[in-house]
Image: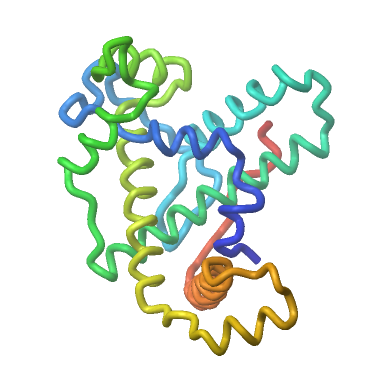
Amino acid sequence: MMSFLIKHKVKIFLITILGFFAGTFVGFGSYFFGDKNYFDTVAVVNGYKIPYKLYYALYNNTIEVLRKSNPEINDDTMKKIQSNVVNSLILDEILWQQTKKYGVSVSENELLMDIQNHKYFLNDQGVFDPRYYFNVLNNLKLTPKEFENMRKKQIAANKMKILIASAISDISESELKSMKTINPNITKAYMLQLRNNEILNDWFDKIRKETSIKITMSDKI
């Protein structure tokens, strides 16, 4: 069963990088790339189809990065990466759908600022450069619209987690003292993080049971 701990344990680091990339200099849309329909999907979440093209871009680039440090990637590793990428995309989509229910949104200005300020798109003077942006997209074979949608989902998901975490009660001194009798090195911040993870996991497990998920991808690697 998936959980929020996927974010910490199995999400490939490149996906995190791509998450920062995932957006566009708002207004470009698909101007340079044109429209192209990709009917293949890897999963369907409550009727929403996650495109195989998006999965493949993340998977393929993760493999390429890993091969630079470890040319001998075995089949088991590749299958784990495949599963992790699919699960991460499903998780992002579930969270995105929940943000709509809770009224959590991402404005065009938020997206614009996020992209313009990311280091991978800045030139030597620290200014956003569309050439850097489009070079990344060309390498990943994704359109600006696909990036925009992916980044919006991740920004909204972070807001959602913050919203849920805001309901977590503080750790009392008595609780902290009690835990220190078991582990003298434990900190209040660590205990809050544990409580945060527990609440997020419980919430997500409930949502997961109410979500219709169908994996449609067979062995297409």
Residue 214 x/y as whole percent: 56, 59
In-front residue for pair 155/215: 155
Residue 164 drawn above or below residue 42:
below
- Image quarter of the C terminus: top right
Taking 203 as reference, is 46 above or below it? Answer: above
The answer to whether residue 62 is left or right of residue 192 is right
Question: Does residue 207 lie above or below 10 as drawn?
Answer: below
**Res 208 visible:** no
State the image quarter where residue 94 is shown.
bottom left
Q: On the picture, is 219 further left or further right than 137?
A: right
Coordinates of residue 139 in the picture (x, y in percent): 47, 16
Quadrant where the N terminus sits is bottom right
Q: Is residue 119 visible?
A: yes
Count every numbered label the image shows and give the total. Answer: 0
Residue at screen point 65% across, 70% down? 186
Colouring mode (rainbow / by chain / secondary structure / one colour) = rainbow
Residue under the image location 70 percent in, 39 percent down: 219
The image position of residue 110, as x and y in percent, is 21, 43
Q: Is residue 190 above or below residue 177?
A: above
